[in-house]
Image (cartoon, rainbow, N blue to C red):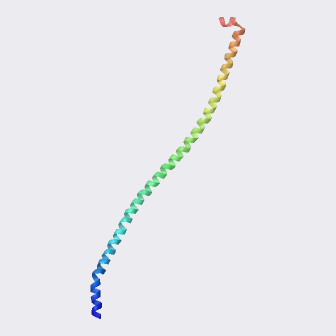
């Protein structure tokens, strides 16, 4: 029976060698995509961080522009208020001048 045990070992030896080689190839294959995957992930992380930085910059610019818009809106309201009163003052002055001309027609002849 010792001879049959040795024969069985000899029979299984090529299968064992092939299995060992297959495990080695499998290990190399598993390691290969993970290194490529890590490199790809690093690129994605770099791209994401760049996009986040641009987004933060754009948000800061947006806040700044909104502040400027608010200031310009307030200034515009003040200027519109002044225009209304200046137009009213001009109209009042025109009416007063016309009233004075009606009262003293000789002054307008000069």
The one nearer the camera, 15 or 101, is 15
- In the displayed structure image, the side of residue 56 where residue 4 appears, left or right: left
Where's residue 5, x and y in %?
Answer: 30, 90
- In the displayed structure image, the side of residue 4 where residue 95 appears, left or right: right
Which residue shows up at 48% across the image and 49% down it? 54
Residue reaching furthest bottom? 1
- In the displayed structure image, the side of residue 21 where residue 75 appears, left or right: right
Where's residue 80, x and y in %?
Answer: 63, 29
Displayed quadrant of residue 84: top right
**The C terminus - image quarter:** top right
**The N terminus - image quarter:** bottom left
Relative vertical location of residue 99 with respect to residue 80 in this rendering, above or below: above
Q: Is residue 93 visible?
A: yes
- In the displayed structure image, the side of residue 11 where residue 49 appears, left or right: right
Displayed quadrant of residue 17: bottom left
Relative vertical location of residue 73 with respect to residue 49 in this rendering, above or below: above
């Amino acid at each position: 029976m010792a001879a049959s045990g040795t024969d069985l070992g000899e029979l299984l030896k090529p299968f064992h060698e092939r299995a060992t080689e297959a495990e080695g190839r499998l290990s190399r294959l598993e390691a290969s995509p993970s290194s490529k995957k890590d490199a790809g992930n690093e690129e994605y992380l770099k791209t994401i961080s760049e996009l986040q930085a641009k987004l933060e910059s754009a948000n800061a610019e947006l806040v700044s522009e909104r502040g400027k818009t608010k200031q310009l809106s307030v200034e515009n309201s003040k200027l519109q208020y002044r225009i209304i009163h200046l137009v009213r003052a001009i109209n009042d002055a025109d009416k007063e001048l016309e009233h004075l001309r009606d009262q003293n027609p000789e002054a307008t002849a000069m």
